[in-house]
Image: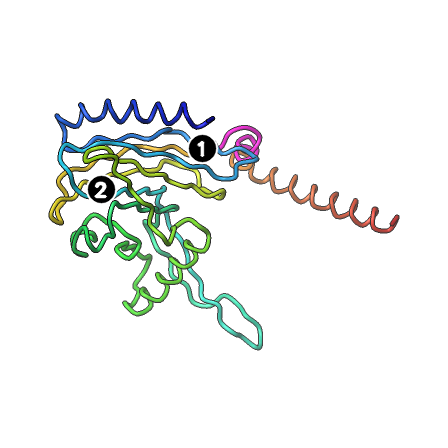
Amino acid sequence: MRHAPLAFLLIAALAAFTSAARAQPLVADLSSHLIAITTGFTGTELVLFGAVEQPGDIVVVVRGPEGPVTVRRKERLLGLWANGSSITFTGVPSFYHVATSRPLDDIARRDQLARQRIGVDQLSFGTIGSVSDTARAIFQAALLREKQAAGLFPIQPGRVLFVGRQLFRTNVTLPPDLPTGAYQVSVYLFRNGQVTGAQTTPLLVSQSGVSADIQDFADRRSLLYGFVAVALAVVAGWLGSFLFRRV
């Protein structure tokens, strides 16, 4: 019963979107545009809802802030595993999630999906320095595996559900280790394999409370923060050793 107010609000919002969609091919919005990361944050779930003027296929893409990521290959050296060759990719989203009303291959051709960068298989990153096509493919595959293992590039796409012919909604699950920053939530309307409508909605993920204060201290006074961290580690180690000896 505690979910009833939210359900009523979503129904009311979707009903309002129906009239708005008569003037636009696609309208959509999020249940919240701000995610606060606190000390006890264990992940959360957003609801994206909207309406279309005419029936079609809906694809939702959630992209986190982009940045460089270095992928290193472990190599055996003198009987020990050590970091070997590496490639630094640029323009890598920190989080990437797709939800669809039907399987992507049934919605559009791969070239059309690649043009919109829809689907993990259609992502293309830049690199720093000259990289062969073979090395790029191997290291990018490793990058995607790491992101998927961390829950930042969900393997299974989400599901967009239609309520009638015009109203739709989808739940977006965000993991506990969600990176902070400005996100983009893009909604695409496809008909006959072509994009006929699109809308981008902002989403902000930021730290708050004690975790935000610690992060701000670390950013502003990194040297002092390092000394404090080392001192706390030494004290914790001494206390642990002292208690162990008493036991």
Which residue matches tag 2? 58
Closest to the observer, 77 or 223: 77
The numbered disc on residue 78 is none
Establish if 144 lies above or below 44.
Answer: below
In the rendered image, residue 209 lying in the magenta stretch gets the answer: yes
**Which residue extends farthest right?**
246
Q: How many tags in the picture?
A: 2
Closest to the observer, 130 or 46: 46
Pinpoint residue 239: horizontal percent, then vertical percent. Answer: 79, 44
- Name the residue at 67% across, 45% down: 230
- Name the residue at 57% across, 73% down: 80
- Name the residue at 38% across, 61% down: 87
- Say left or right for 151 vs 129: right
- Mark 2 is on which residue type? Ile
- Name the residue at 64% across, 42% down: 229
Q: Which residues are magenta?
A: 207-217
In the rendered image, residue 21 lying in the magenta stretch gets the answer: no
Which residue matches tag 1? 206
